[in-house]
Image: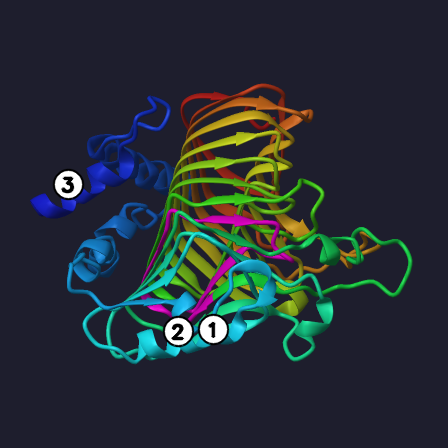
């Protein structure tokens, strides 16, 4: 590996370090691991795979991690715009949507890095879009609670979104406030809960960031989303940190953080417990790093699903470094539908604890989530290449701690297990696998 600059070395050390010994990892350790992965895969497949460290070597990714310092320095002379100045009541009953829109228009149209304030009250807001571009970098400072209406009819124009930030650049959204999706009315009408029709197959995402570049979201609470809690779609250079995301384990499709077509993103120091994936990373996403994540309840951290309805999907350069899973359906999962195409590649899961997790490590190239649980067998598949599992330990709630259910026609390639200690067994099919260090269980 080429010699890195001192600034990049410092960045790598900061990203990979944490207070927990389980989470600790050094640059030297990962450099040696990179060398091993190349050697192991060259031995197993006849060629070396790209470096898992290329995520950190990407200059654009490194630059994105200085966003808050670079863009959002505080100043006593900053213009402050409060939603209360535009008639917001904040009593939890009055509709404050128009006040929020007027305050946004003023802040977005101002120069000098304005701050939009949401005071410590309870604001009822109907579906709303905060549109860019804005004249300057902008901070939305949320001290209070923004709560969704429980009336489903207010979403008649757009069933997919509640709060949307649309093409806003250089944006900081921070707490310590709460965004409450008031999702109970949606959950009870979901087809996943309601056995008789009519039932709902769609519900709004609580907060969507759409094509927002140079974005920081931090120190916020998201709770009880109608469906997904927060989604990053088509964004570049994103930091999400110190987030708390909560919903009941039985709430359907309530992913914590959803990432699609987004590049150069970090998620750190966040606690997520919902009825679906804690973090889901889907097609078009690249250079995504998650660290110091606590997950549970929920379905774990998932790459995918990919390839549904024959689609061509790609996800690459994803690192999960430092996570704790407790009582989740899955730990770290890659899931792809039969009949799709594309690739999930250059993925690393490192320094992870599992406690009573049903599927701690799973690759499922035969994913099937239909109402009858039946999917047609197909030879076409999304490729899964170059996946590293390092320093993973804990307990499984099922008989198999490791499941590699790969495609017979397009097997999983370049899968590496290093220092993995899980109880129970392993079920593996159609996988090209290498081991390093102490690994238990192993595939038969």
The label on residue 443 is none
Task: Specify whether 380 is left or right of 74.
Answer: right
Q: Is residue 2 visible?
A: no
Element marked by disc 1: helix
Residue at mark 3: 10
* Residue drawn where x is 78% and y is 63% of the image: 200
Q: CA distance from mark 1 to mark 2?
A: 6 Å
Mark 2 near mark 3, Cβ–Cβ under 8 Å?
no
Question: Which comes sooner in the sequence, label 2 or label 3?
Answer: 3
Residue 44 placement: quadrant: top left
Task: Specify whether 349 is left or right of 331.
Answer: left
Q: CA distance from mark 2 to mark 3?
A: 40 Å
Q: Which residues are magenta?
A: 209-234
* Residue drawn where x is 60% and y is 37% of the image: 330
Element marked by disc 2: helix
Q: Nearer the viewer, mark 1 or mark 3?
A: 1
Residue 210 position (above or below residue 407):
below
Question: Which comes sooner in the sequence, label 1 or label 3?
Answer: 3
Q: Nearer the viewer, mark 2 or mark 3?
A: 2
307 part of magenta stretch: no
Residue at mark 2: 103
Outermost right residue: 196
Label 2 crowd bin: few (<14), some (14–19), many (20+), radius 10 Å: many
Q: Closest to the observer: 310 or 184? A: 184
Mark 1 near mark 2, Cβ–Cβ under 8 Å?
yes
Label 3 crowd bin: few (<14), some (14–19), many (20+), radius 10 Å: few
């Amino acid at each position: 590996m080429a010699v890195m600059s001192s600034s990049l070395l410092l960045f790598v050390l900061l990203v990979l370090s944490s207070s927990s010994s389980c989470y600790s990892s050094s640059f030297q350790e990962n450099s040696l691991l990179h060398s091993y992965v190349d050697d192991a895969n060259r031995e197993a497949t006849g060629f070396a795979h790209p470096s898992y460290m290329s995520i950190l070597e990407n200059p654009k990714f490194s630059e994105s991690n200085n966003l808050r310092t670079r863009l959002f320095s505080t100043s006593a002379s900053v213009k402050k715009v409060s939603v209360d100045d535009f008639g917001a009541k904040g009593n939890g009953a009055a509709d404050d949507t128009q006040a929020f829109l007027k305050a946004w228009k003023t802040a977005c149209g101002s120069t000098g890095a304005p701050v939009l304030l949401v005071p410590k009250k309870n604001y009822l807001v109907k579906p709303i879009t905060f549109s860019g571009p804005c004249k300057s970098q902008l901070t939305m400072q949320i001290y209070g609670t923004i709560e969704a209406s429980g009336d489903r009819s207010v979403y008649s124009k757009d069933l997919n979104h509640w709060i949307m930030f649309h093409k806003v650049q250089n944006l900081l959204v921070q707490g310590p406030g709460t965004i409450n999706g008031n999702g109970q009315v949606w959950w009870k009408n979901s087809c996943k809960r309601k056995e008789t029709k009519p039932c709902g197959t769609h519900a709004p995402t609580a907060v969507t960031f759409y094509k927002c570049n140079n974005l920081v979201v931090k120190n916020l609470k998201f709770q009880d989303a109608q469906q997904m809690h927060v989604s990053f779609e088509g964004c570049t250079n994103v930091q999400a940190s110190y987030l708390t995301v909560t919903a009941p384990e039985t709430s359907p499709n309530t992913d914590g953080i959803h990432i699609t077509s987004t590049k150069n993103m970090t998620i750190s120091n966040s606690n997520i417990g919902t009825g679906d994936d804690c973090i889901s990373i889907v097609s078009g996403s690249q250079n995504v790093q998650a660290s110091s994540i606590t997950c549970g309840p929920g379905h774990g951290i998932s790459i995918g699903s990919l390839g549904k309805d024959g689609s061509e999907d790609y996800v690459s350069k994803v690192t999960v470094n430092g996570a704790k899973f407790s009582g989740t359906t899955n730990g770290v999962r890659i899931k792809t539908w039969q009949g799709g195409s594309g690739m999930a590649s250059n993925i690393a899961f490192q320094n992870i604890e599992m406690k009573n997790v049903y599927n701690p490590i799973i690759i499922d190239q035969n994913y099937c989530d239909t109402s009858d649980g039946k999917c047609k067998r197909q030879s076409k598949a999304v490729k899964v290449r170059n996946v590293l599992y390092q320093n993973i330990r804990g307990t499984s709630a099922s008989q198999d701690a490791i499941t590699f259910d790969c495609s017979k026609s397009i097997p999983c390639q370049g899968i590496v297990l290093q220092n993995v200690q899980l109880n129970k067994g392993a079920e593996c099919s159609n996988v090209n696998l290498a081991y390093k260090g102490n690994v238990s269980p192993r595939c038969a």
